[in-house]
Each structure stands twice: as C-alpha cells, then as structure tokens.
C-alpha cells in the first residue's frame, strides 16, 4: 500500500496569519495521524513563512508516524535535519523565496553537490529522497549520487491530467520503471488531488509514498480533516 504523508505547511500558514497558535499545528499533525495519515511532511523555508524551525523540533517530539522534512540543502537546513533526525529528508532545488517547488534537480550537473550531502544524511541514519522531474536520466544520476529514493514532481502530470490522462502519465510510468530497475524507492508529490491520485497510483502501483498538502487542506474545509484523509486513503487503493 502506498503511504500517505500529509504536508501541513498550509496549516502553519493559517496559524501565522494571526500570530497566535490557532490552529494548533502539533494537534493537527497528531489528528492527521489519528485519522489515518502514514506520515507528516513539512517544508521549512528560509523566511519561515509557514513552518518555522522550532515547529520542526516540536513535531519530532510528538509524531508517532513517519516524519519527512523537505527543503533546499543549505547549511542551515542540513544542520536542522541532522539535529532533528526525521525518518526521511527530501532535497528540493528551490531558491529562497520561491513560491512553491516547480521543478526537480538537475542530478547530472549537481552530482558532486548532492553526493556530499547524501553522504551526511546517510551517516546520520536518515533515509534520503531527491525531487526530480519525470526524466529517466535524472533518476539514473540521482541513484548514482547515492539517494535512497526519488520523489517524482507531479505538477506537470496534474496539469495535463484533465486534458489527456494517458499522455499525462506516460513519462511518469517510464521514469518509475527505470527507478524500479535502479533498485531505489519511489515517492511522488505536488498538485496531487482527489481527481488525479487514483489514476496515478493504479498506473504506478509501486509508489512507496505520496506527500500531499495544498489540495488536501482545501478539501478539508468542506469535508473535514477526518473524512478528507479517509478519501485520500481510498484513492490509494489499487
Ligand atoms: N513535494 C514537494 C517537494 C513539495 O515542495 C510540495 C509542496 O510543499 C509537495 C510535495 C506537496 O505539494 P502540494 O501541496 O501541491 O500537495
């Protein structure tokens, strides 16, 4: 069964809008777990506009499922994850201030840079994942750099899904097959939602984990968090 990691960045955005502690990020994370989430994902950005560094530390102490921290591997980010030791670190190539992740790593040109960082993550006993586009060569060089998993950037899939699902999924199936042959794990994320998730998973059933934030939190406004998480888990059935 593919795992669902709930990205709670948007919950922190809502909290930060008023300066207090409503909604309570830690309680929401624990409730996501109680409602069936297999993990929690956060993306602490340099400007702390949603998840703050002290949220990361506090979450580590209360979570009972898998904790995934994603971010650009600046020195500050690496120091944080080596101290907090989550179950998984996902490296994204975002510049500081970027609105959201919108492309994967160039694992060919960034090979040496990524290899050194992945060594540090492995030495700390943390599983690593590298965010890549649906591109077999990028998967091959991600594996060469020593990553445990790749996360496929599903933004373009989500964008094209409505027009032509078969065409939208095609490069993802090819890349996912290559990832499987390379013997590394496979995650996916960005813009996945209740409409496009099941098609993705039934075509690529060997996805280990999806991380979903924006659409899931939007759906929760109408359905409530408990029903929303149950609905996403239903979409993960193959
Ligand atoms: N994966 C990565 C690397 C991301 O940066 C994000 C957004 O924070 C997600 C997955 C989740 O994307 P969405 O919020 O669109 O579900």
Image (cartoon, rainbow, N blue to C red):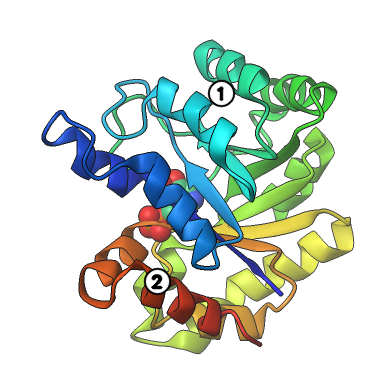
Question: In the drawing, does residue 123 fall left or right of residue 25?
Answer: right
Say which mark, if any, is on residue 186: none
Q: Which residue is mark 2?
A: 226
The answer to whether residue 211 is seen in the rendering is no
Q: Earlier in the sequence, mark 1 or mark 2?
A: 1
Q: Secondary structure at mark 2?
A: helix
Q: Nearer the viewer, residue 228 or 196?
A: 228
Question: In the drawing, does residue 207 fall left or right of residue 105?
Answer: right
Question: In the drawing, does residue 209 fall left or right of residue 97?
Answer: right
Say which mark, if any, is on residue 73: 1
Disc 2 crowd, CA 10 A, few/some/many (<14, 14-19, 20+): some
Q: From the top left corner, tell me how far across and down residue 183 is, in percent.
A: 88, 57
- Total numbered circles: 2
Q: From the top left corner, tell me how far across and down residue 203 is, in percent.
A: 64, 84
Q: Residue at x 83, y 39 (%)?
A: 144
Q: Residue at x 70, y 39 (%)?
A: 87
Q: Residue furthest left?
A: 18
């Amino acid at each position: 069964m593919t795992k669902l990691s709930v990205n709670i960045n948007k919950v922190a955005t809502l909290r930060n809008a008023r300066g207090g502690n409503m909604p309570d990020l830690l309680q929401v994370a624990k409730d996501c777990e109680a409602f069936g989430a297999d993990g929690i994902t956060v993306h602490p950005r340099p400007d702390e506009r949603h998840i703050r560094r002290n949220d990361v530390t506090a979450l580590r102490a209360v979570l009972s499922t898998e904790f995934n921290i994603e971010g650009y591997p600046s020195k500050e980010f690496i120091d944080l994850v080596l101290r907090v030791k989550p179950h998984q670190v996902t490296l994204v190539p975002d510049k500081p201030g970027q609105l959201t992740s919108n492309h994967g790593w160039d694992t060919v040109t960034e090979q040496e840079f990524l290899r050194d960082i992945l060594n540090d993550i492995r030495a700390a006993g943390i599983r690593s994942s590298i965010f890549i586009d649906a591109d077999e060569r990028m998967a091959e060089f991600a594996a060469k750099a020593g990553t445990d998993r790749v996360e496929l950037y599903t933004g373009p899939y989500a964008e094209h899904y409505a027009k032509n699902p078969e065409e939208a999924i095609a490069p993802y199936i090819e890349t996912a097959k290559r990832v499987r042959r390379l013997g590394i794990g496979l995650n996916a994320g960005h813009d996945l939602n209740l409409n496009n998730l099941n098609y993705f998973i039934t075509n690529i059933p060997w996805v280990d984990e999806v991380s979903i934030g924006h659409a899931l939190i939007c759906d929760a406004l109408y359905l409530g968090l408990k029903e929303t998480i149950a609905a996403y888990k239903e979409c993960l059935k193959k």
